[in-house]
Image: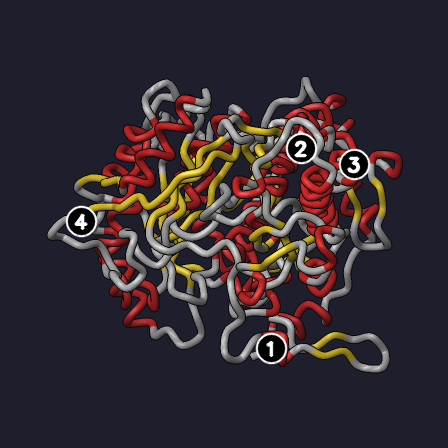
């Protein structure tokens, strides 16, 4: 069996100008980054304003195992399959973070004959979007500390600075640091601080939810960097940082155009965490893809309890998107861990949102036909269509039946709906997601969480949607509890914070880290480059 990188390096790529032409874009409509990558300027959105929107198809999953179940592979493969049955489709996915690439999961460009190319470039630096986000974020951190050092107004309480620094790498040693040591204050105000990974940055979430530069700058200006001595929030706008920060993101806000193994156009843009942020690609990439194709296949991080819920409640609400269909990715290894009750709950969640769904049973090489057939039978007993797919080894041809079923679902208007209104209290929003999406009996709030939510509402942020940070490994808030507990469970909310610029309230449950660590044997140790610049070891 060929590895992902061996397959990727064996494909003859089409010039990006040809890929753009297949979408109806000319040479002047793209900004080339070499021969095989380009950016699409936001001006295209205005030009295509009167063009009808394509159907949006969301790829989500059951609760995953630690290695993931192949949502990106399914997303790319399904887009290729829809094209093979004679329809016009594009894919829109997130950009990989270097942290997971060098850590445990590897890259995020799909797999086998259902991946996006050039795979090495996409996984390593790409067009520099994540670096621009990192720099913009850290510029604000530097301005905040300079503001403290010179005692500018509005005065910020050093103990209540909430804006940390970021780096696009898994580095547990940076979770907690001390700033301003030595030289009697010449090195700044001494205080506690820390780093988060770039994918967890509010600037990342803002980039993905902003639809133009004006909105981007306004959202950045609304970021809370800290509080004064009266506990009044101090914003990025109050210290004058939003202009320079937005300038650093001038090019990063333009979506990236690449191609799949089969030469289908793919937009790869933005990569927010699916826990602390909303786990979806950018709104502008999705909007452009909808204008340039009849079907747009996209994905949301982790299982339907996290990614799909945030896609619906945050991204679709912000962008006014009505998804037409959903695909729930199921694998034999995840079924062995979580059971059919877990799959049933995720299907139930999609049904509550009014989005018709089909199950894609993603084949792995070690799976037996008997096991896959048995799994398909159990899935169909849930009253939903289930199809065995083999996108990794067969590309689009490995999912033609799935493509036909998904296109058929899209022919009817979905009954899409939100599960909560924005004007209900934050705690009620949390309880709605906990009970209806996770299947919990209730949500309980620690005294700290209750106090923080009360303060957020008192500051005027109570009408924002909630972004619940919960483990992806379980429907509960305990990663060691697989499946779907039948004896009931509660979700415990430990704390809350407002991402005012992004426009949501982050609700923390369990122990969620915004700076992951590397595993005992990091993936980085297998990556190499030869004297000719050929990269090996990426997966």
* Residue 94, image x, y percentages: 59, 48
Q: Residue at x 52, y 70 (%)?
A: 104
| Mark 2, residue position | 288
* Residue 400, image x, y percentages: 49, 52
* Residue 293, image x, y percentages: 63, 35
| Residue closest to the far left | 487
Q: Nearer the viewer, residue 99 or 49?
A: 99
Q: Residues within 10 Å of mark 4 (few under 14, many from 20)?
A: some
Q: Is residue 126 above or below residue 443?
A: below
| Mark 4, residue position | 489
Q: Earlier in the sequence, mark 3 or mark 4?
A: 3
The residue mark sitting in front, 2 or 3, is: 3
Q: How is the image coloured?
A: secondary structure
Circle 3: element type:
loop
Q: Is residue 247 left or right of residue 151?
A: right
* Residue 105, image x, y percentages: 52, 67
């Amino acid at each position: 069996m060929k590895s992902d990188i061996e397959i990727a390096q064996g494909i003859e790529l089409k010039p990006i100008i040809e890929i753009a032409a297949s979408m109806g874009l000319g040479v002047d409509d793209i900004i080339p980054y070499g021969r095989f990558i380009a950016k699409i300027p936001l001006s295209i959105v205005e030009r295509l304003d009167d063009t009808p929107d394509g159907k949006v198809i969301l790829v989500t999953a059951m609760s995953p195992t630690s290695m993931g179940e192949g949502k990106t592979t399914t997303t790319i493969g399904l887009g290729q399959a829809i094209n093979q049955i004679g329809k016009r489709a594009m894919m829109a996915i997130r950009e990989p973070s270097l942290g997971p690439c060098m850590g445990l999961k590897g890259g995020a460009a799909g797999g086998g004959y259902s991946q996006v190319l050039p795979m090495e470039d996409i996984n390593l630096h790409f067009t520099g979007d994540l670096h621009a986000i990192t720099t913009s974020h850290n510029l604000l951190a530097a301005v905040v500390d300079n503001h403290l050092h010179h005692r500018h107004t509005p005065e910020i309480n050093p103990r209540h600075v909430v804006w940390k620094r970021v780096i696009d790498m898994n580095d547990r040693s940076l979770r907690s640091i001390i700033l301003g040591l030595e030289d009697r204050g010449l090195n700044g105000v001494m205080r506690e601080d820390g780093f988060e990974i770039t994918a967890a940055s509010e600037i990342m979430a803002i980039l993905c939810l902003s639809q133009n530069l004006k909105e981007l700058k306004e959202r950045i200006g609304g970021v809370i960097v800290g509080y004064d001595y009266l506990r009044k929030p101090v914003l990025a706008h109050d210290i004058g940082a939003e202009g320079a920060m937005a300038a650093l993101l001038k090019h990063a806000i333009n979506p990236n155009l690449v191609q799949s193994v089969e030469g289908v156009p793919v937009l790869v843009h933005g990569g927010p965490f699916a826990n602390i942020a909303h786990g979806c690609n950018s709104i502008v990439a999705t909007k452009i893809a909808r204008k340039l194709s009849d079907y747009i296949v996209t994905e949301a991080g982790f299982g339907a309890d996290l990614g799909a819920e945030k896609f619906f409640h945050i991204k679709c609400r912000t962008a006014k998107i009505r998804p037409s269909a959903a695909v729930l990715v199921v694998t034999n290894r995840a079924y062995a861990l979580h059971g059919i009750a877990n799959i049933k709950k995720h299907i139930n969640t999609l049904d509550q949102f009014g989005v018709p769904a089909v199950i894609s049973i993603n084949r792995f090489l070690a799976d037996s036909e008997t096991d896959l057939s048995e799994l398909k039978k159990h899935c169909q007993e849930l009253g939903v269509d289930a199809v065995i797919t083999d996108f990794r080894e067969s590309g689009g041809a490995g999912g033609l039946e799935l493509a036909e079923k998904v296109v058929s679902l899209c022919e009817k208007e979905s009954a899409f709906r939100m599960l909560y209104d924005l004007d209900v209290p934050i705690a009620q929003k949390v309880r709605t997601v906990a009970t209806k999406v996770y299947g919990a009996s209730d949500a309980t709030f620690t005294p700290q969480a209750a106090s923080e939510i009360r303060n957020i509402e008192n500051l005027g942020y109570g009408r924002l949607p909630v972004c619940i940070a919960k483990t992806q490994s379980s429907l509960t808030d305990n990663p060691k509890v697989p499946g779907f507990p039948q004896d009931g469970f509660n979700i415990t909310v430990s704390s809350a914070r407002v991402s005012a610029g992004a426009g949501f309230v982050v609700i923390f449950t369990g122990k969620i880290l915004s700076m992951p660590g590397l595993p005992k044997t990091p993936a980085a140790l297998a990556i190499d480059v030869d004297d000719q610049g050929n990269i090996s070891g990426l997966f």
